[in-house]
Image (tube, helix red, strand yellow):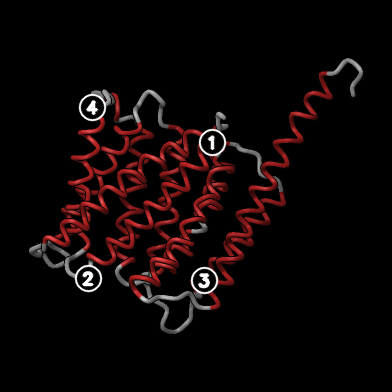
């Protein structure tokens, strides 16, 4: 049975989030032995090789001039800044906590879609967005003594990841997904290379770490691919909430590999954020069902 664009987009988002979370756990583990700039450079170099080889095999390589659309560039900027801020914070913040804050991303994307794309958002969804952002404050707990300043980097990640997702919607569909992924990996790799010396220089890598970074690169390649498909296939307000599946993976992997468990404020805040996001999805679906019915009634000769 053929899936609708929204269902295809939702499935792609869920797969992408699982791959991103596995990548995050792998990177956090490897970063205990080398600086994050080196991790970004090595991982991106491997990803670029894999992506370009696959794109060449599938005939998806196009001239660079055609791929460098302004929205592609904006997407790469959002990805690079979001990745740098996230990975620097990831070394110092528990995996589940970083993922919990990132759950605000669908709300911010919905907000951006309303402000910049003119997607209709009624007062109920505006209230849900405000409540969801309040849930983020519960998770972050600003002003609390002992709060890690690195948590603010995760908030920056949310802002720039939202920019990335919104820009993805406007990238011309003539630009292949793999070409966008390749350009994104190049951007992240260049940023990583620039960070190596300031963060302490190059560290010799063990075979184990090389294999783990190959695994991380594969996860990133798959995640980039499915995230772009998700944002192209379905409506933002339908697809974006499926990011929440990453929190389940983050809690599980954080416990298994790092012994981290979420505390009560994080659980409460996450429930509020996710609940708000799911409510925005419910309202979007309800409004989308009402509009066709109203249009049909208006076009009926009897007005029925």
Furthest residue to the left? 204
Q: Earlier in the sequence, mark 2 or mark 4?
A: 2
Question: Marks 2 and 1, how far apart in space?
Answer: 38 Å
Question: Marks 2 and 4, how far apart in space?
Answer: 36 Å
Residue 209 higher or lower than 72, as above or below: below
- Residue 272 lies left or right of residue 56; in this view the side is right
Residue 106 higher or lower than 137, as above or below: above
Choose mark 1 or mark 3, whichever is in front: 1
**Disc 2, disc 1: CB below 8 Å?**
no
Question: Marks 4 and 3, how far apart in space?
Answer: 45 Å
Residue at horizontal 46 percent and vertical 41 percent from the top: 12
Question: Marks 3 and 2, how far apart in space?
Answer: 25 Å
- Residue 232 lies left or right of residue 271; in this view the side is left
SS at circle 2: loop
Question: Marks 4 and 1, how far apart in space?
Answer: 27 Å
What residue sits right under mark 4 in the picture?
57
Question: Marks 1 and 3, how far apart in space?
Answer: 29 Å
The quarter of the displayed image where residue 95 is located: bottom left
Residue at horizontal 15 percent and vertical 57 percent from the top: 210
Residue 139's label in the rendered image is 3
Choose mark 4 or mark 1, whichever is in front: 4
């Amino acid at each position: 049975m053929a899936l609708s664009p929204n269902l295809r987009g939702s499935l792609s988002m869920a797969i992408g989030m699982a791959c991103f979370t596995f990548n995050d756990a792998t990177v956090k583990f490897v970063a205990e032995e080398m600086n994050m700039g080196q991790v970004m450079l090595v991982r991106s170099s491997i990803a670029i090789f894999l992506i370009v080889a696959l794109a060449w095999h599938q005939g998806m390589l196009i001239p660079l001039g055609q791929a460098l659309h302004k929205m592609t560039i904006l997407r790469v900027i959002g990805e690079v800044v979001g990745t740098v801020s996230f990975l620097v914070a990831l070394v110092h913040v528990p995996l589940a906590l970083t993922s919990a804050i990132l759950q605000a991303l669908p709300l911010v994307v919905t907000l951006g879609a309303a402000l910049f794309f003119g997607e209709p958002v009624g007062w109920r969804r505006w209230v849900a967005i405000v409540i969801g952002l309040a849930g983020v404050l519960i998770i972050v707990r600003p002003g609390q003594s002992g709060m890690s300043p690195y948590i603010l980097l995760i908030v920056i990640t949310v802002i720039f990841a939202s920019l990335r997702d919104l820009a993805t919607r406007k990238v011309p569909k003539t630009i292949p997904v793999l070409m966008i992924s390749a350009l994104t990996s190049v951007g992240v790799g260049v940023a990583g290379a620039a960070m190596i010396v300031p963060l302490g220089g190059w560290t010799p890598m063990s075979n184990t770490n090389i294999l783990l970074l190959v695994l991380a690169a594969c996860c990133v390649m798959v995640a980039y691919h499915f995230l772009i498909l998700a944002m192209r296939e379905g409506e933002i307000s339908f697809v974006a909430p499926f990011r929440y599946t990453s929190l389940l993976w983050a809690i599980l992997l954080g416990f298994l590999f790092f012994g981290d468990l979420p505390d009560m404020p994080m659980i409460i805040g996450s429930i509020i954020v996710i609940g708000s996001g799911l409510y925005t999805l419910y309202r979007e679906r309800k409004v989308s069902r009402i509009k066709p019915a109203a249009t049909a009634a208006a076009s009926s000769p009897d007005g029925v």
